[in-house]
Amino acid sequence: AMFVTAMAGNPVVQGFANTLFKDQGLSIEVTPLNWMLGSILPGLICLGLAPLVVYFVHPPLSVDPWLMKQTNTHNEMGKRLDGKAVDRLCSEAGEARLKTDLFRETLLDVVMMYGDVEGRARSRAHEILVKYHSKDSLNTPRPSPVAKSKAAQGGATLSGAAPWTRAETVTLVTVVLMLFAWIAEGKVPGFKMEPTTTAFCGVSALILGRVLTWKDIISEKAAWNTLVWLAILSSLANALKDARVISFFSEQIAQGFERAHLEAWSGFSILTVVYIYSHYFFASCSAHMVSMYTAFLSVAISIGVRPLGAALQLGYASNIMGNLTHYASGAAPVLFGKGYVSLGEWWRVGFIVSVMNVSVFVLLGSVWMRSLGYM
């Protein structure tokens, strides 16, 4: 929210604000500078508060001190954990300790970090833990023991890095060419390639260059899951727009505010909150902006809010709603698909963080923009 270039939809709302109201005699000029100045203070405060809020509402698991002590003792003898060592640790731990989430998470991390390269320690840990825990809780993504072992045994340093492999060279060239195609599309005369086409060409190049195999592609279950669900949700959002559900919703809100004759600041605060939490019905921040930004900006201006302040505040609101759900923004499905956080926890923590963001931007942000002369 702090920079107009930080999200694809921000230049879109900048263009809406600067052009759509000229025929009404309103001169709104949203620039990268006033966008940054209006958001810098509330943005930095939210940036500092967000980790603290997440820490308190969803604290990270600690480690089981007993298991770590036993593991360190074993490591001091110069041995890596194998299946027999895991059997011994679990036997000494006792059934009560085995049932705890703390022991489960610590043991899974321990066998990844200190287990044998063949993976016998990890397999045995799963066989034991599945008696006390659900299978889903044992499938949290972790680095493979082979990767950990290679890093521990022959990890390259800056002073003695291994030479580039052919696969790394192919990957680098492919990524550079893809970035060029994405940046140049529509900007370099005569060059036109759709972003999706560029992505498919990049994947094809990695397969033809034997960096990836088709088995690697189809085994990325999280990516396929993200692709399918995001496509469904995007189609649903477009269907709601085509059926004029979104425009009807916006019109009803506008009429309600006009009938209520609310004072400018309180009315705009409520309007901003409604704008943000209506994002539960969208699978893209950009789609939300295109569908509802101008309608809400028109209402804000009609109840007496200064045009520049209303344009900027709704622009910021269009960014801070991106953490509400696991489909709220382009990055959300990718991050959620990694499997580290459950659906319920994502929604719960997302809502709590959104309350913090809304409080800072609506309350403190409005005061800050008044001091700048924007509202």
Image (spheres, grey):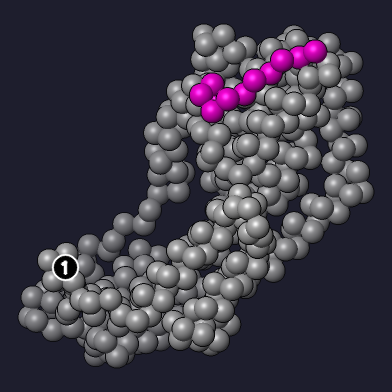
Circle 1 Cα neighbour tier, 10 Å, few/some/many (<14 / 14–19 / ≥20): few
Look at mark 1 in the image and give the residue it sits on: 157
**Magenta stretch: helix, strand or loop mostly:** loop
Residue 280 visible, this orientation: no
Question: Which residue shows up at 49% across the image and 78% down it?
Answer: 206
Q: Position of residue 228 (x, y in %)?
A: 69, 69
Quick one: 6 or 295, which is closer to the camera? 6
Q: Position of residue 47 (x, y in %)?
A: 43, 35
Q: Residue furthest left?
A: 77
Q: With 176 as the anchor, is 156 left or right in this view?
A: left
Q: Quadrant of the N terminus?
A: top right
Q: With 305 as the anchor, is 6 left or right in this view?
A: left
Question: Which residue shows up at 89% across the image and 16% down it?
Answer: 259
Relative to 363, say whether 206 is above or below. Answer: below
Q: Which residues are magenta?
A: 25-35
Question: Which residue shows up at 23% across the image and 70% down it?
Answer: 67
Relative to 227, say whether 293 is above or below. Answer: above
Q: Position of residue 34 (x, y in %)?
A: 54, 21
> In which quarter of the view is residue 204 placed?
bottom right
> In which quarter of the view is residue 271 placed?
top right
Relative to 332, say whether 19 is above or below. Answer: above
Question: Which residue shows up at 87% across the image and 38% down it?
Answer: 247
Q: Residue furthest front?
A: 190
Residue 116: in magenta span: no
